[in-house]
Image (cartoon, helix red, strand yellow):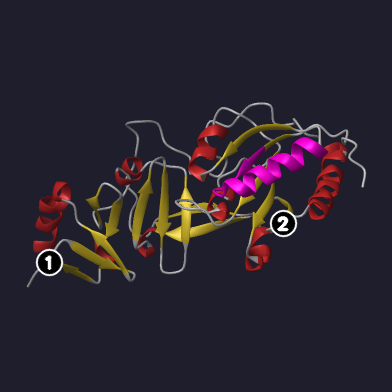
Amino acid sequence: MSTEHPRIHLRCLIVDDEPNAVNLLEMFIQQNTSWDLLAKCYDAREALAFLKTHTVDLIFLDINMPHLTGMEMAALLPPATRIVFTTAYSEFAAESYGFPTIDYLLKPITLKRFYTALQKIETYFSRPDHQPGAAQQPASSPSNAIPQPPAGHLPSLPEDEYFFVKSGRALQKILLKDILYFEGEKEYVRVVTPVHKLLVYRRLKDIEEQLSASFARVHNSYIVNIARLESIRDNQVFVGGKQIPISEKFREAFMNRIKERVF
């Protein structure tokens, strides 16, 4: 098998929480390509932070990772970034092609299988309309983030209001009244409805300022839809089958609102 370096020059990134998998991919890339491996990230949040100041052409992206999965991260990537998913589970293959995916590698990845992916990647980036380096400037935020109004101009959204969240190649319409809760994680918020869990690039505080009176902050990481609550017990609320803590910081204000509805 030839070890000649391909002529295609790419900027790539490895995102995987398994050090052995990262080391193997790094070795394959260094020994068999002329690509620039810009970084190795062991967490999706670390990778997204890196991508705020760096532009890459290709990401080798693990699917099963803590905090943010590979699928959730993929939904936040700039549109020009191409993905090779890496995972030990075959059941995500069909879903992966809802993103700009070039290949899907099952672990443990062999050199023979890596070469097959290499040929697909070279073929893709050899096309005139897919030349690497087309996106020169790193995005200040992921391309599918909900546009953020200027500070001081955050209108409240009425109950029948809706917005769209990018999920793969689709824009998913979400009715505000259908939302069970918002879960914040640093600069990202997971929007949870009975049928969707979608990640958006926004801070929980910014979203809170736009919500109607039906929503209440119960924790630094959670805003709940009071109209969708199932029960409240001790220092917990239950919504959509999830148990959410009420922190001391928000308990008094939250319970004062609940008392208005107690018979």
Q: Is residue 98 one of those drawn in magenta?
A: no
Find residue 131 and report its horizontal and vertical position in percent: 81, 35
Q: Secondary structure at mark 1?
A: loop
Residue at label 2? 105
Q: Is residue 231 left or right of residue 110?
A: left
Q: Secondary structure at mark 2?
A: strand
Kindly identify the amino acid type of the residue bearing the numbered disc 1. Answer: Arg
Residue at the spot 19% in from the left edge and 56% down from the top edge: 246
The answer to whether residue 235 is left or right of residue 11 is left
Which residue sits at x=30%, y=43%? 209
x and y percentages locating residue 109 in the rendered image? 72, 55
Position of residue 15 in the picture relative to residue 33 (left or right): left
Check if residue 21 falls in the magenta segment: yes
Task: Name the amino acid, label 2.
Answer: Leu
Of 176 and 57, the residue lying toward us: 57
Q: Which portion, as a residue range, is magenta?
A: 13-32
